[in-house]
């Protein structure tokens, strides 16, 4: 077994775990940093190590378009291409095909679409996605699925879930890279019975882990938790569970309380580029005029490279001038902040105080 | 004496030296890295140390506009604001006032101008420039001068040189930061007698070092060396000499052969952002399609962080996608390449082979 549950919380479904991969063990619950185009934006591998990053996520769709499979194959895979020697998870490309690309035609084999960059035509289905993820050589590959939008009517959701299940089976049956785990993805929108059905069918196929997909696509927060609650009871206890696309502190805490072990999100790197710092007391707009003379760090008590060395006054100045160093320092801080948050969460579970800690997080961060 | 000449080349005017500053000693000949807005673009202080940078240059004009004197004063000066604990040289702002700003009026006291950013009105003359440089707390301050354009007629050059001399005197007489050296700037355009006159008058005033200004402003290369040749013989042997705005390998070697000790230029950081690598065999366009599959480093034999870890294929991919990491890695390489070049130059002087080395540099880098 690749996944070991080390401790279960007495009052919630939160759990401490360890996931073994071909590139090292991962302590869960874990937040994974998104490296869309073979780079966690503005950071290099040594920064990721320093900020406590455990897993980097690569995007199959983006990497298929740029630089393309041949270039990454020539480097011997994504780890070597980007020189990240820790675990990598790759998504299947399904989400981007349906949200970014111009769709031409969907068949049982997959999707014909035009690149969002230059209109070049591509085809991506379970076969192509798994082949690309095999080239990438990720430690965890995701099945090719259809990510339902919100809202979505019952009829469409039903048809889509069946397609997702058939694609999951085909994804499983394709050849994978050596040591590569494959995770299934539970879809079903806001329909609890569809979520259950999808989960049960995926478990019959059998995967190394299971994601709850179609969450954080614009739905109200309660629907997010409902989707998790409708899926988790039908997933095996001894496999990791992953909510895709989520990176807000109190939402991750709520999902962990419901049995989730893994998350990923572009939030920390994206909002850094817009001048916003993630802190344990909520987000802070560092570009704001109130920080012009401020000699304190971006976050009091933070031990990241940015906070150990620079003032809000300096970082604000750099951001105001559009200096690359400003968004880089803030990216270092934000990635560190979320990784440290997960470490704090793991300690709370280990110490048996997760529920109290979760309430405190909500008080601290939701204004 | 702050400056010590350690060795003079037998066949040229090249010399090895050491310049002592309040923030450490500088080995000359030296290339100084430009940190316009309190950041060497895309790099942090630890990167500068790692690339062998000795001196950071700050721009008085840019820092006066953003973040302004009060903000840097609140941080206790530029060293503390940007957390660079090595030597800093600041220019006077004269060059930018005459080249970037919208000039309103020039008087004996200085220039009234509108900011190139938002039209806000400022006044900068010897008094204001030295006051700002005192706030910045640089180790070396430059006098306020008028940088002549190329071409420039004799009559204008004559008047301007007299103004530059009077402003140099006033700059010298203003109060300076503790331990701050002040350098004069020889102007005079392409007129050898004006260069000599300016140099002689500046030496009468007496400065800690002397720059040759108005070089690398669009003139043919031979005029550049002519300006140096017309100035150096009238400057004291025991003071450092500095050509402003120059950063091309063979041109720096030629100037060192003529007795120059210091250089600065935005070239390494600027061309990195455009995807060009500086190498000991000339510039290389890393974005070029020929590198798509190339598994070699940006420069063979280079020991910078970029070349130790990443391939041309990867750096090219990042640059092609506009990823910040691409220009950052190339900036690290370029800054390292020029600093290493100067180190190689110092070794050539120390070993008594400077002339041969200089010829080889020209063969290697001028296509």
Image (tube, coloured by chain):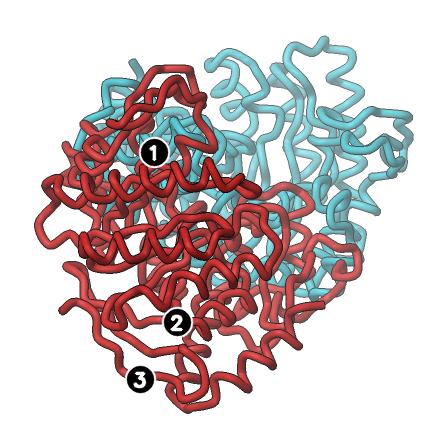
Chain colours: A red, B cyan
| Quadrant showing the C terminus of chain B | top left
Q: What residue is shown with label 3?
A: A7
- Please, which chain is the residue tagged with disc 1 on? A
In 3D space, how far apart are the residues under numbered discs 1 and 2 (Cα atoms)?
29 Å
**Mark 3–mark 1 contact, CB under 8 Å?**
no
Query: Label 2 crowding class (10 Å Cα cut-off): few <14, some 14-19, many 20+?
Result: many
Q: Is residue B338 visible?
A: no
Task: Please tell me which of labels 1 and 2 falls first in the chain.
Answer: 1
From the viewer's perspective, is the residue at label 1 or at label 2 nearer?
2
Query: Label 3 crowding class (10 Å Cα cut-off): few <14, some 14-19, many 20+?
Result: some
From the viewer's perspective, is the residue at label 3 or at label 2 nearer?
2
Secondary structure beneath label 1: helix
In 3D space, how far apart are the residues under numbered discs 3 and 2 (Cα atoms)?
12 Å
- Image height of A256 relative to B245, above or below: below
Same chain, marks 3 and 1? yes
Residue in front for this viewpoint, B32 or B269 = B269
Measured as percent of width and height from the top left, residue A320 is found at 69, 46
In 3D space, how far apart are the residues under numbered discs 3 and 1 (Cα atoms)?
36 Å
Query: Label 1 crowding class (10 Å Cα cut-off): few <14, some 14-19, many 20+?
Result: many
Q: Quadrant of residue A292?
A: bottom right
Measured as percent of width and height from the top left, residue A19 is found at 23, 68
Measured as percent of width and height from the top left, residue B237 is found at 49, 43
Task: Please tell me which of labels 3 and 1 falls first in the chain.
Answer: 3
Task: Please tell me which of labels 3 and 2 falls first in the chain.
Answer: 3
Instruction: Tell me the number on the disc at residue A327.
Output: none
Instruction: Tell me the number on the disc at residue A61.
Output: 1
Secondary structure beneath label 3: strand
Secondary structure beneath label 2: loop
- Please, which chain is the residue tagged with disc 2 on? A
């Amino acid at each position: 077994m690749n996944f070991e549950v080390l401790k279960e919380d007495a009052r919630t479904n939160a759990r401490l775990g360890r996931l073994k991969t071909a590139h090292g063990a991962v302590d869960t619950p874990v937040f994974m940093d998104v490296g869309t185009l073979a780079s966690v934006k503005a950071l290099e591998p040594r920064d990721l190590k320093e900020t406590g990053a455990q897993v980097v996520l690569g995007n199959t769709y983006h990497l298929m378009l740029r630089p393309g499979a041949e270039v990454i194959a020539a480097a011997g895979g994504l780890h070597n291409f980007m020189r990240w020697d820790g675990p990598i998870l790759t998504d299947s490309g399904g989400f981007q095909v349906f949200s970014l690309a111009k769709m031409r035609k969907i068949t049982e084999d997959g999707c014909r679409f035009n690149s969002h960059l230059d209109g070049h035509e591509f085809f991506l289905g379970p076969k192509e996605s798994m082949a690309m993820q095999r080239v990438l050589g990720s430690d965890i590959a995701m099945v090719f699925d259809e990510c339902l939008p919100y809202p979505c009517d019952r009829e469409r959701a039903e048809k889509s879930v069946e397609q997702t299940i058939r694609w999951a089976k085909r994804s499983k049956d394709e050849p994978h890279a050596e040591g590569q785990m494959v995770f299934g993805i539970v879809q079903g929108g806001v329909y609890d019975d569809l979520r259950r059905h999808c989960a049960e069918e995926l478990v019959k196929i059998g995967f190394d882990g299971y994601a709850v997909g179609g969450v954080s696509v614009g739905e109200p927060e309660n629907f997010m938790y409902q989707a998790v609650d409708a899926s988790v009871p039908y997933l095996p206890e001894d496999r990791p569970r992953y909510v895709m696309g989520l990176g807000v502190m109190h939402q991750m805490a709520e999902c962990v309380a419901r049995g989730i072990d893994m998350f990923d999100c572009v939030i920390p790197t994206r909002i850094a580029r817009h001048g916003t710092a993630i802190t344990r007391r909520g987000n802070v707009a560092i570009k704001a005029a109130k920080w012009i003379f401020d000699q304190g760090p971006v976050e009091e008590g933070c031990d990241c490279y940015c906070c150990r060395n620079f003032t809000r006054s300096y970082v604000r100045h750099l951001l105001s001038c559009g200096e690359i160093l400003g968004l880089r320092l803030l990216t270092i801080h934000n990635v560190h902040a979320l990784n440290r948050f997960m470490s704090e969460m793991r300690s709370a579970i280990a110490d048996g105080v997760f529920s109290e800690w979760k309430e405190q997080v909500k008080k601290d961060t939701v204004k």
